[in-house]
Image (cartoon, rainbow, N blue to C red):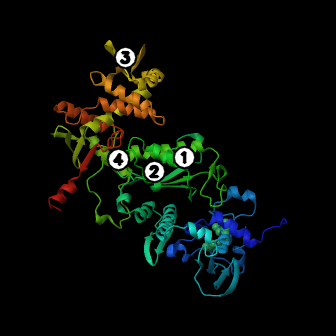
Amino acid sequence: MTIQVLKNEVINKIAAGEVVERASSVVKELVENSLDAGATQITVEINGGGLALIRVTDNGSGILSDEIQLAFERHATSKINSFEDLSLNHSLGFRGEALPSIASVSDVEIISSNVNENSGTYAELENGLVVKKQKQARSQGTTIAVKNLFRNVPARLKFIKSKTTENSHIANVVSQYALAYPEVRFSLFIDGRESLKTPGTGNLIDSINAVYGVEIASNMMPINSSQDFNTDEKGVVISGMVASPKISRSNRNYISLFVNRRWVANRNLVWAVEEAYHGLLMTGKHPVAVINIEVPLSDVDANVHPTKTEVRFKEEGNIYLALQRAVRQSLVNTAPVPRVGEITASYRGQSQLIVPPEQRRMEMKVVNEEEPGTPVVSSLPVLRLLGQSMNSYIVAEGPDGIYIIDQHAAHERIMFEKITKQKEQQGVEVQGLLEPVSIEVLPVQDEILFKNYKYLADFGFTIEPFGNRNYLVRTVPSIMYKKDWQSALNELIDKLSIKNKANITEHIISTIACHSAVRFGQSLSHDEMRELVRQMEQADLPHACPHGRTTMIHITKKQLEKEFGRI
Ligand code: ADP
Ligand code: MG
């Protein structure tokens, strides 16, 4: 065979392999084009898993009649002129690849009416070429219908799973853009049935309500990154909402991340969000978050892959830190105590679903002002102790209802914060044992302890090897003195053997906290309970134990009144 330049038709089909992986990729590209055209209303209609029909209608700027064929040419774009423009470019598209790729693997119909023209234009394309074109009335905007997707690419068709799978991918794409652009009214119809509609109010909470429903929406808290975290992260602004830790999901699909409002897939950034929830969610649970990271255009490169879901940062480490801190900050500031069945159908449709944090803190202040000198340090009001139930639960009363506290989980949280603070400040407080205690470890533990015994000194355990699997323990953390520190130490050795050392400090501290805390089923004196409640009031994150279990339940006055039929 001689060398020859491939025909455009072949090139476009090859490129389509990258840009148009499945029906949802078509939806993504068309919706991005509508957003780039400044649309405030975007309707997506899908039939037969997107293979029969994908129709996207917008009220954006429209395409000039004379430029319709051009829009479907390869590398034809109105969004950049030169390579340098890339670093100034705010638009989602810029490669001029989507329309020609789509048109090479489907039949396309387009009706568009440009702002500067009186009438609209209808055109039909086959194999990427306009085969029919005529005037047609239409209000400003563009409708693109993609039919018979992949009919001429049997290899691709074979990989398409069920229509339901394709539909859910498409619904996900539209949902993500609806979350990224709350000011745009999105509608999605699947096989004629409306499956998503956002109001386009510009309030993120309304989009979250439309996409995820009222239960999640009423538990979202704004991220407040107005304070500059670090001068290294100049120009990076993190905004959006994260869910209270009591709302969690068993996969990561509910973490939506956008960079300059471009939906991105970036594992490290997802980790940063999860890190921020560390100690608040149970193992295997993942948070709900909708976050936009605003980065100066010169510090981010979206031109990594034709689909542009991957981005590269100049300083990814800084972005990671800024993101993690912003999320953590908002959890610490605003995490509310979980309430029983607070969500009622009557919330549906209301746009202000959550109490803004300013207001929430105001309420706290009022309570605390009654006790002068009490610093406003927690999201728990001052509580009045009522008693203990089942030797396990402490019952207390607050300004708005009753609190039932899991005594072990709560005490564990208190201990966890105490040791963490000690460690950050003057070091973990230690207590010398009257006599050094000799312990013998299992053969499997010996190597691990031998490697780590010095490290454990940072946590209050002064240990010396004594030969033959024996060790001498001279000091223990003060809070463990007179507690069963031996079983805690055993557990610590096992924790240290885990290969993944991420968050090892937290794991060690939470083990110590767990073994120092009062037990479930332990009878407590009135004074002990008072002290525990007082410490809970001052905890940074009183509502969850370090393992992520709930420490307390709040039954509001209103709920009681409702239960008793008073309102
Ligand atoms: P890109 O988005 O990278 O520029 P596309 O192939 O997706 O490339 O689109 C080519 C051009 O067609 C765009 O640059 C734009 O000028 C025009 N276009 C596509 N879709 C729309 C739309 N919905 N509204 C207005 N113009 C559009
Ligand atoms: Mg495009």
Measure how far apart labels 3 and 4 are at the Cα level.
46 Å
Residue 509 visible to an observer of this rendering: yes
- C-alpha distance separating marks 1 and 2: 19 Å
- Mark-to-mark CA distance, 1 and 3: 40 Å
Labels 2, 3: front one: 3
In the displayed structure, 19 sits above or below 459; it is below
Residue in the picture at 41% in, 34% down:
507
**Disc 1 versus disc 2: nearer the observer:** 1
The residue that mark 4 highlights is 361
Residue type, mark 4 in image = Arg
Question: Which residue is found at the position 63% from the left and 63% from the top?
Answer: 91
Q: How many marks?
A: 4
For the residues carrying marks 1 and 3, which lies nearer the camera in this image? 3
Image quadrant containing the N terminus: bottom right
Marks 3 and 4, the one that precedes in the sequence: 4
Callout 1: SS: helix
Residue identified by numbered label 3: 473
Q: Are marks 1 and 4 in contact (CB under 8 Å)?
A: no
- Of mark 1 and mark 2, the one earlier in the sequence is 2
Q: Position of residue 376 (x, y in %)?
A: 34, 39
Residue 37 makes an appearance in the image: no
Answer left or right for 228 relative to 444.
right
- Bin the neighbour count of mark 2 within 10 Å (Cα to Cα): few under 14, some 14-19, many 20 and up: many
Find residue 268 and name its label.
1
Find residue 94 and report its image quarter.
Answer: bottom right
Q: Where is mark 2, residue-wise?
A: 223
Q: Nearer the viewer, mark 1 or mark 4?
A: 1
Q: Are marks 2 and 3 in contact (CB under 8 Å)?
A: no
Could you tell me which quadrant the C terminus lies in? Answer: bottom left
